[in-house]
Amino acid sequence: MVKTVSIVKNFGLTASRKLHVVVLTGAGISIDSGVPIFRGRGSMGEIPEARRLASKAGPPWNTRETWEFYEWRRRLVSQCKPNAAHYTMVEMERYFENFHLITQNVDGLHIRAGSKGVLELHGNMWRGRCTRCGASVDLPETPLRSIPPYCECGNPLRPSVVQFGEPIDPNVLSKAFAASRRAELFFLIGTSGVVSPAAQMPLMALQNGAKVIEINPDPTVLTRYMTLSLRGKAAEVVPRFWSELHACKTPHAKQASLWQSRE
Ligand code: NAD
Ligand code: ZN
């Protein structure tokens, strides 16, 4: 069903600087920058070279084969630029006094856009990690000078990326959970909501009475719990929604913005 909603009147949304705001982003926010997702149409799985390289990558993750796959992805992402949705996160971080950006993405585009305190649940492909001495090493250049890259201690590095089945850094996870529990306004952007524990975060916010807004061109398993679902591409919907919400500083603001909300 398509209905026209006013974000101010129907949902009582305002942009008070004091609100606790949390944003959780997934692969969908980077699709508009040209970064392919893992599954489905237009995904990496449909690119034969990516499939071939991915099939050789694996534990202990510090091998030449793993880095050949990561170098393929890093080269691709190096040719992509953050989009308007990434830049909107930078504006929101500057505006709200209590703002947390949580991402499942490993592409580093939020940081490249200028976001500061990003909680990267799954790590970052532009960093390496030493399994011997624990060092975290920035690896901003592609191509790398050596494959695999080495730690100063002489051990080969692994990508600082959480692989399927591996635990998330407990410090990052506890910060993300704590922020979600305190959230009053929570945005879920470009995530399918099937990968846990990220999928639990909007539900924690709901339990706290937060308004939770999903931005995604398609419905997800979480859609039915949402306060509001906005259908469309992140790079188009996020900046437009933000500029309208930003104009609504009080619950009775005159600028009632109208949206097509599809259920
Ligand atoms: P997902 O692939 O499961 O879901 C992507 C979601 O994005 C879908 O719901 C889809 O409808 C939506 N989408 C498609 N186009 C969009 C657009 N233009 N704007 C907004 N949304 C759009 O991704 P996920 O939920 O992030 O989970 C997959 C896992 O894969 C994550 O754990 C992540 O670490 C990893 N991953 C990361 C990247 C990256 O770093 N960019 C890329 C692929 C996968
Ligand atoms: Zn080391």
Image (cartoon, rainbow, N blue to C red):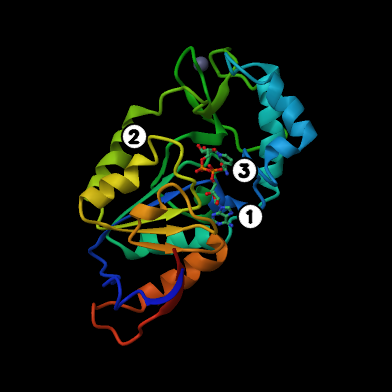
Q: Is residue 111 visible?
A: yes
> Where is ligand 1, by quadrant?
top right
Q: Are marks 1 and 2 in contact (CB under 8 Å)?
A: no
CA–CA distance in space, label 1 to label 2: 26 Å
Q: Quadrant of the C terminus?
A: bottom left
Residue type of the residue flagged with mark 3:
Ile
In the rendered image, which quarter is residue 241 located in? bottom left
Q: Position of residue 32 (x, y in %)?
A: 62, 57
Q: Residue furthest bottom?
A: 254
Q: Position of residue 50 (x, y in %)?
A: 73, 33
Q: Are marks 2 and 3 in contact (CB under 8 Å)?
A: no
Per the image, the residue denoted by label 1 is 33
Marks 3, 1: nearer the viewer: 3
Q: Is residue 111 above or below residue 56?
A: below
Marks 2, 3: nearer the viewer: 3
**Badge 3 residue CB within 8 Å of ligand 1:** yes
Q: Residue at x 28, y 77 (%)?
A: 249
Q: Nearer the viewer, residue 119 or 185?
A: 185
Question: Which numbered disc covers residue 193?
Answer: none
Q: Position of residue 28 (x, y in %)?
A: 55, 51
CA–CA distance in space, label 2 to label 3: 23 Å
Q: Residue furthest right?
A: 48
Helix, strand or loop for disc 3: loop
Q: Residue at x 58, y 59 (%)?
A: 83
Per the image, the residue denoted by label 2 is 173
Q: Residues within 10 Å of mark 2 (few under 14, many from 20)?
A: some
Residue type of the residue flagged with mark 2:
Leu
Mark 1 or mark 2: name the one nearer the start of the chain: 1
Per the image, the residue denoted by label 3 is 37
Q: Position of residue 238 (x, y in %)?
A: 48, 65
Q: Nearer the viewer, residue 135 or 100?
A: 100
CA–CA distance in space, label 3 to label 1: 11 Å
